Amino acid sequence: MARRYNRATSGLSEELNKYPRHVAVLCLTFWLLLLSSAVEAGLYTGSDQIVALSPDNVKSVLVNSSSAIVVEFYASWCGHCISFSPVYKRLARDIKEWKPAVDLAAIDCADENNRKVCITFGIRGYPTLKFFHAYSREDSAGQTFKGLPHDVQALRHHIIDLMEKHQDPWPPACPPLEPTSQAEIDIFSETNNIRHLALIFEDVGSYIGREVTLDLLQFENVAVRRVLSTEEDLVTKMGVTEFPSCYLYYPGGNFTRLKVNIEARTFYSYALQGLPGVVRSGKSLPATTYPISKHTEDLWRLFNRSRLYMADLESTLHYSLRVELTSHPIITGEALTSLRKYIAVLAKYFPGRPMLMNLLKSLSSWLQDQTGDQVSYQAFSEILENSAQAPDAALPEGVRWVGCQGSQPHLRRYPCGVWTLFHLLTVQAKKSGGSDPMEVLSAMTGYIRNFFGCRPCAEHFVNMAEESMMQVNTFTDAILWLWSRHNRVNNRIAGALSEDPNFPKIQWPPPDLCTACHTVKGNGDHRWNNEQVLPFLQNYYSAERILTDYLEDESEVLAKQKVKRVSLQQILEAQKRIEREAREVVSPPNLPPPTQVEEEEEEEEEALADEEEEGVSDGGAAPAAQMEGKTFEPTPWARAETKRENVRRPSIVGMKMRDVQEDIVDLDSFVNQRYKAKAVQVATSSRVKQRTLQRNREERDSGPVFGLGVAGPEPDFGSDEAMRVQKRELSARFGRDAGSGKRGSWMSLLSVGFSKADVSLCVILYVLSSMCLLAMYIFFKTRLRLRRVKVSLP
């Protein structure tokens, strides 16, 4: 169905010629660029539906082929070849549906690799067209086109004339092109299982019947036969009075006239392809019912094919910004510039809901404020998810395809949404009175070039843009350019596996949607009426016609966004905590400065001393009976000291735990800790000894008085004499303890944390340094004496 309006491009080019051209310098620059690119890559690309010949494939394409081949021999530097190339491209689009019977090819003879091929076929001038019949032999030189018309219709007719001259056997891929008769019609239903038989009545010199026959070549359940006006039996039987005209003939002699707006090839082809049961070869019949899926995005939604749906547009933005951009972790250079333009155009022209417009404006502002040469998608995503908590700003998550839904999950959807979005933006830019007609098209081309996931699709679109987007001078040009290129893409991919049988690729809008958009030229070929196409597009893509069915409520979207933001924050905090703990395990933190450690130790020791004093004053000495049967428990300060040593020991020098059993400590911090702990022990032991002396004196001085066992008066420990006695006892006890353990303490101090080899090395170094100092002292002393003796000589 894609070829129904295949003259769109030529018609549009004629209309665009009415608009002002670029200045002469710009035209000259474009011409030079075209020439240079032609020399490098030829005049045709993969988007032109023309087979590129080379020494490697020329034999397989031309020799013994089941279809006829038309070959253009050209030189990419040739000016006439360059002028003819647009005509040849239009011809390829025009007869695209004829491919099983005839195909187009081209070879660049300016390429030195192809010179031998061109010489073999006797090519002496450019451009040269040759026709190769089906099943051509290896020594066939082909039939040369005479005159080389620059008109698509003339080329098309010449190809048909050459095809009809094919000798037996007739190629099976080519349908019969000769006129039919009453006898053949009578037995057609007996020999063919065809649902619809179309009879095109025409004059002898008309090509419409043969063209429509080839147009329907790729479709099943329909056959086309031409009937000449001289076939009086059929003409009289069916009451035909107009030529050309088309009738549908059914078994039993029933027939009816095919209703079309204009009796012409394009309208016949479109109407016949839309008949019930007619489907492209290899495609299934359109489904009348659709399966219901458990997933929300796969549910079939009833929709109006003549309207737009905001659900499609929001789904397109969701996939574009949340899915397609994620494949670019770092966006830089041209891609960053394209992203800025894309978001800016959306924020400026997209007619979205308030919450979506707030988010797009926030995104655009953030991108414009980025002064660096790159942006990470993670940072972009944080703004996209409204991490800054801007009021009423959100993009709904997930997709809800309505007008762009396909009969299968892999058909239509996002590509349809992208086309719809860009058509909408071009129309809205014109209505809003923008200043740059290329603003939307350049933003769209940049996004497709840098981010669109289908790379061959992106390459084809960029080729079209580089080829003709320079012709756009006004907003009207921009609307019509995008529309015509969309139709060109539909023509190219019609019949591909990506085509949905329920939504065939046609030239849009079809006659039943916009009758006034279609007309014919004087020669009968189809022509687009751009004066009617433009208002139709402006009305179809207007913001007022967008339906809001199947949309999620804004309050629900904002609530979900808030929940997601909180969840993401929790996840990020958990990830940071895990990373911090991992870093601490791999590289333990260094000790705090010594002054801070000393302050913490002093505060801890003072607190422990205060607790001990409170315990002694409140509870007194524990009864001996309560201590029986219990294991010894370290004192609080001993526990604190052990705990500090255990905590600090793995990170004494800010390194990992060593595997060896030897401990290395900081002597300064060790000495401070050692003496402070000793001081705490001495102070505590003095208080314990004071209580012990008190109890001993009580027992010594107390005794039975008058045999009654009454205790005598308590000694006065507050007196000077008692205090002196206590101090002497404590001093003697501490002196003995210190004297007996002095040598052992110093030895333990020197040995803790060091191996014997370390201690030996230290001793050797100290001895060597002492000897060096002594030698230096002797040397300088001797030198001084010698100098004094010299001075005293006469």
Image (cartoon, rainbow, N blue to C red):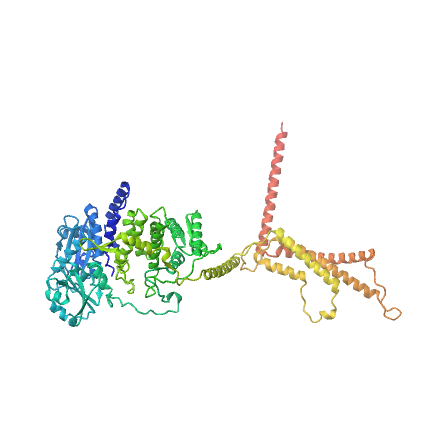
The answer to whether residue 676 of the structure is visible from this angle is yes
Decide which of 770, 589 is in the foreground and name it: 589
Above or below: residue 590 compared with residue 278: above
**In x, y percent, where is residue 761?**
57, 52
> For residue 105, what is the image quadrant?
bottom left
Q: Position of residue 736 (x, y in %)?
A: 73, 58
Tally of numbered tags: 0
- Is 256 in front, or is 278? 256
| 320 left or right of 715 in image | left
Q: Nearer the viewer, residue 97 or 429?
A: 429
Residue at 60% of width from left, 39% of height from top?
Answer: 779
Q: Residue at x 24, y 45 (%)?
A: 35
Asked whether 15 or 401 is in front, the reply is 15
| Above/below status of 347 relative to 627 | above
Instruction: State whether residue 55 appears in this view.
Output: no
Left or right of 135 in this view: 478: right
Q: Residue 509: where, in percent of width, then height?
A: 28, 58
Taking the image as shown, residue 268 lies to the left or right of residue 610, namely left
Quadrant of residue 541 in the image?
bottom left
Image quarter in which the N terminus is found: bottom left
Task: Estimate the x, y position of residue 251 in percent, counting from the top left.
Answer: 17, 71
Quarter holding the C terminus is top right
Q: Residue furthest right?
A: 706
